[in-house]
Image (tube, helix red, strand yellow):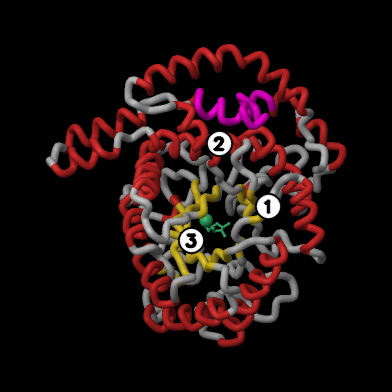
Amino acid sequence: MTELRIDANLVAETNAQQAEYLAQDYDMLAGQLARRNIDINAITERAMAFEVAVPSWGTGTGGTRFARFPGLAEPRNIFEKLQDCAVINQLTRCTREVSPHFPWDRVDDFSELRQYADNLGLGFTCVNSNTFQDQPGQQHSYKYGSLTNTSQAAREQAIAHNIECIQWGQTLGAKALTVWVGDGSNHPGQQHFQHALERYLDSMRKIYAALPDDWQVFIEHKMFEPAFYSTVIQDWGTNVLCAMELGDKAKSLVDLGHHAPNVNIEMIVSRLIQFKKLAGFHFNDSKYGDDDLDSGSLHPYQQFLIFNELVDAEYRKQEGFAPCYMLDQSHNVTDPIESLMNSAEEVQRSYVKALLVDREALYAAQADNDALQASRLLKAAFNTDVGPILAMARSRQNGAIDPVQTYRAANYRAAIAADRPSSGVSGSGIV
Ligand code: LRH
Ligand code: MN
């Protein structure tokens, strides 16, 4: 295993300063939970097994169409992105997998890339295709769409790219392809809704046919942007209809920021679980549009309610339930490593709080239509400070009790700045 960039002694030193307080807080919480017939160590074991994947594209400073303000020692290629992902996993111990995006992370030798990641203790989860940008020298533009373009040549080009992503992903050991297309229209009448969706399904059938037996394809819906009147895969309904139409290896991925404000996302999750079509998640938070803000930073109760549905499915041993948890964020004003560590912890926090829900009591309250008791049972779990469990789960795996504090003590960016001279180019765009 390659030497990790944060000195393990520094992690041990910063942990040593906090170990006694953590032990006190952990014991206090143990007592509180024991009164609720909950064994804190059993919960901590589940927290230690929890994983959420990091988006490779989230390790660089993000931007908007107006501007992007790169930070110090930005990663310039997938190898440097993996170095940063290794730091995130070293300190949080819950982000062992990375989700790559092609062609942003394309390399000449994918076996070398897999070995490089493996040496950092990292693996690859589902890969992402990109037919929402034109690449230099590309023959057919995606200006008017990709998998749904009225031009068969453009569709074939987009299909070929997705099939190539599957092949690259196989070399990396991934087991799924996420397909998000921004295809849609900006003017009423510009696109025939049914014809566009028929072209989408026709294209996806060809991608589906190229999936290895043990692979899946994840369809990602999004309400708007880059199209601002209609989007072909606009909502979960269209998404799950397509997943059902394509077959068992097609499932629906839920990006939290891809819904209209106030949509009941936890109920969408319940529906997808019930029909065995839940692919997984792109966790983030948002106030207005697809803001890609840090997970749990604005709506921690909604994120908890989503995990309440997920833990309930685990508790009921729901058939076909194997969701893939990933972050998908854009870090415009924070150090991406700090935001990704913080967000991984916030997603893990929602999961651990959901484990504290007294499910049998909740079922009883639901059966009795005792709405207040049902709400109190959820709030009892949500209002429990599970911080000591998350910190103990990290320290028991030689992670950092306080990842951001340890990361700052390591002064990582300054330490690697010489290795990563900045391009000096600011520009705009999400990455
Ligand atoms: C689309 C999206 C999709 C990625 C992209 C970077 O908004 O959520 O998941 O391909 O962001
Ligand atoms: Mn996404």
Which mark is on residue 123?
A: 1
Residue 41, above or below 188: above
The residues bearing labels 1 and 2 have C-alpha atoms spaced at a distance of 17 Å
Q: In which quarter of the image is residue 413?
A: top right
Q: Is residue 142 magenta?
A: no
Q: Which residue matches tag 3?
A: 225
Q: Which residue matches tag 2?
A: 48
Residue 372 horizontal side relative to residue 109, left or right: left
The residues bearing labels 1 and 3 have C-alpha atoms spaced at a distance of 31 Å
Indicate which quadrant contains ligand 1: bottom right
Looking at the rendered structure, the kind of residue marked 1 is Gly
Q: Which of marks 1 and 2 is nearer the N terminus?
A: 2
Q: Does the magenta stretch include residue 400?
A: yes
Residue 313, above or below 357: below
Asked whether mark 2 and ligand 2 are closer than 8 Å, the reply comes as no
Q: Earlier in the sequence, mark 1 or mark 3?
A: 1
Q: What stretch is highlighted in magenta?
A: 388-406
Asked whether mark 3 and ligand 1 are closer than 8 Å, the reply comes as yes
Q: In which quarter of the image is residue 339?
A: top right
Observer able to see residue 251? yes
Farthest-out residue, right: 418
> Considering depth in this image, is 67 or 93 the residue closer to the camera?
93
Residue at horizontal 52 percent and vertical 34 percent from the top: 45
Which mark is on residue 215?
A: none
Residue 413 horizontal side relative to residue 181, left or right: right
